[in-house]
Image: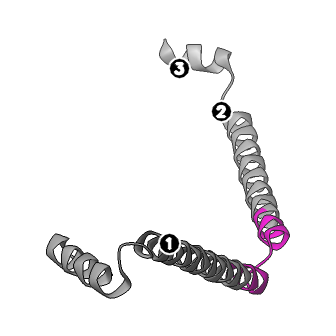
Amino acid sequence: MFDVGFFELLLLGVVALLVIGPERLPKVARTAGMWIGRGRRILQSVKADIEQELRAEELKRILKEQAASTPVHEILEEGRSTLDEVKKETESVVKQAADEAASTTSTVPSGADRTDDAR
């Protein structure tokens, strides 16, 4: 956040020592550290709350999108109806093929006739 190097900290310490004095400097440093710690905790708490609210809003948006989309049971029902149609078509094709096979075998000459033709 702030670009504070060693030289800046040393200069700040010397100025604080001259202004505050050596007797009160440790107490002031503790108090300043305490307030800085509290400030950081407050900022972390606010940041966590904001992130939690953003996640909650994202989840609400996702739930709203899912509610607007086609429900799963409708998708499953469409799949079942499509499979039923395919099943019916397959059964009719198999039945037609069986009927054709049955009609073809009835027109084929018997085995005795074929042996006579081969002689």
Residue at figure coordinates x 85%, y 68% from the top left: 73
Q: Which of 3 and 12 is in front in this view?
A: 12
Q: Mark 2 points at which residue?
A: 108
Q: Residue at x 35, y 79 (%)?
A: 21
3 or 2: tag closer to the N-terminus: 2
Quarter occupied by residue 77 = bottom right
Left/right placement of residue 103 relative to residue 41 reads right
**Between tags 3 and 2, which lies in front?**
2
Q: Percent position (x, y) of residue 64?
A: 75, 85
Highlighted range, magenta? 62-79
Q: Do the residues labelled 2 and 1 touch (CB within 8 Å)?
A: no
Of all residues shown, which one is farthest toward the left? 7
Any mark on residue 27, and which?
A: 1
Main SS category, magenta section: helix
Identity of the residue drawn at 30% across and 78% down = 17
Disc nearer the start of the sequence (2/1)? 1
Cα gap from disc 3 to disc 1, whole angstroms: 125 Å
Q: What residue type is labelled 1?
A: Lys
Q: Can residue 3 be seen in this view?
A: no
Look at the picture and state if 104 lies above or below 56: above
Identified at 80% across, 64% down, the residue is: 76
Q: Position of residue 114 (x, y in %)?
A: 58, 20
Q: Which of 48 and 10 is in front in this view?
A: 10
Residue 41 sits in quarter: bottom right
Q: Mark 3 points at which residue?
A: 117
Q: Where is residue 91 in the image (x, y as percent from the top left)?
A: 78, 51
The image position of residue 112, as x and y in percent, is 66, 15
Q: In which quarter of the image is residue 13?
A: bottom left
